[in-house]
Image (tube, rainbow, N blue to C red):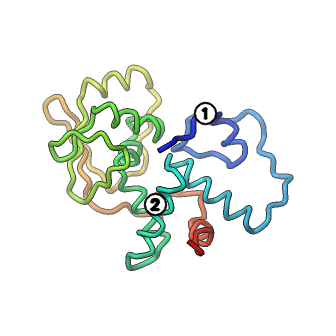
C-alpha cells in the first residue's frame, strides 16, 4: 500500500494539527477563508482520520465496513478498530513520536506480539495481547528523542522484564478519553453510499 510521502506541513496547514501524523508545526496560520461545501467538510474529516492513522483509502473503507457490521455505535467501533492497530498502540504508549515511526519500528522487526515476531504495522491486537519491545531499541529511541510524552492510554499496562519492555492490552480503548478533534460522524456519512 502506498503511504503519503509528501510535505507534512502542507497537510497540517490545510487540516490542522494531527499529532499522530507528525510532531512538526506550521509557522503560517491556517487558511480559514475558504467556504467549504457539505461534501468538503466530510472530505476534510475523512482526510484527517486517514492522515492521523497513516492508512490508505482502501484500508479505511474496510475499517468502516467492519465497524458498521458490529453492534453499537459505528463511530466508536471504527475508532476502537483503529486504536487497536499495533502501530497506534505503540504510538499511544509514547515511545515513538508519530504513527509513522511506530510503523517503521514494526516493519523492521523489532516488535514481538505474544512471543511471535510481527512485521505488519496494521496487525489488529486483541485484549490480553502482550507486545514486547527490546530494551536496546528503546534506549536508542530515547537517545534520539528525549521529548516523549506518555499519551492517555488507560487500556495499556507497561511492565519491564529483563531487557525488554512489555505492553499488555487490558481492555478496549475509551474513545471519550482519547480527545479527538475529528468528527467521526462526518466520516461515516462520507462513506454512507459505499
Mark pair 2, 1: CA separation = 24 Å
Q: Position of residue 76 (x, y in %)?
A: 46, 69
Seen from the viewer's position, the closer of residues 108 and 28 is 108
The label shown at residue 119 is none
Residue found 37% across the figure and 49% down from its top: 122
Query: In the image, is residue 34 above or below residue 87?
Result: below
In the image, is residue 133 above or below residue 79? above
Residue 63 occupies quadrant: bottom left
Instruction: Please report the residue visible at 52 percent of the width from the left and 41 percent of the height from the top.
Output: 3
Q: Earlier in the sequence, mark 2 or mark 1?
A: 1
Q: Which residue is mark 1?
A: 24
Q: Is residue 193 above or below residue 108?
A: below
Residue 155 occupies quadrant = bottom left
Q: Residue furthest bottom?
A: 71
Q: Quadrant of the C terminus?
A: bottom right
For the point 66% across and 42% down, the residue is 12
Q: Is residue 183 above or below residue 34?
A: below
What is the tally of numbered marks visible in this picture? 2
Q: Position of residue 51 (x, y in %)?
A: 56, 48
Residue occupied by mark 2: 177
Q: Residues within 10 Å of mark 1 (few under 14, many from 20)?
A: few
Whether residues under marks 2 and 1 lie with C-beta atoms below 8 angstroms apart, the answer is: no
Few, some or many C-alpha atoms within 10 Å of disc 2 (few <14, some 14-19, many ≥20)?
few
For label 1, the SS is loop
Give residue 142's quadrant in the image.
top left
Amino acid at each position: 500500500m502506498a503511504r503519503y510521502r509528501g510535505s507534512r506541513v502542507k497537510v497540517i496547514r490545510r487540516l490542522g494539527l494531527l499529532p499522530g501524523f507528525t510532531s512538526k508545526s506550521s509557522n503560517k496560520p491556517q487558511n480559514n477563508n475558504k467556504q467549504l461545501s457539505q461534501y468538503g467538510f466530510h472530505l476534510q474529516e475523512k482526510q484527517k482520520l486517514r492522515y492521523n492513522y497513516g492508512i490508505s483509502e482502501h484500508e479505511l473503507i474496510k475499517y468502516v465496513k467492519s465497524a458498521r457490521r458490529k453492534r453499537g455505535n459505528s463511530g466508536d467501533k471504527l475508532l476502537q478498530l483503529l486504536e487497536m492497530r499495533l502501530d497506534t498502540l505503540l504510538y499511544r504508549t509514547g515511545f515513538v513520536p508519530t504513527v509513522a515511526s511506530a510503523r517503521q519500528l514494526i516493519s523492521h522487526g523489532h516488535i514481538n506480539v505474544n512471543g511471535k515476531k510481527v512485521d505488519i504495522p496494521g496487525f489488529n491486537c486483541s485484549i490480553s495481547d502482550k507486545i514486547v519491545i527490546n530494551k536496546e531499541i528503546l534506549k536508542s529511541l530515547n537517545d534520539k528523542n528525549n521529548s516523549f510524552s506518555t499519551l492517555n492510554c488507560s487500556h495499556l499496562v507497561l511492565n519491564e522484564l529483563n531487557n525488554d519492555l512489555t505492553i499488555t492490552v487490558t481492555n478496549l480503548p475509551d474513545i471519550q478519553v482519547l480527545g479527538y478533534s475529528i468528527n467521526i460522524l462526518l466520516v461515516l456519512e462520507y462513506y454512507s453510499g459505499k
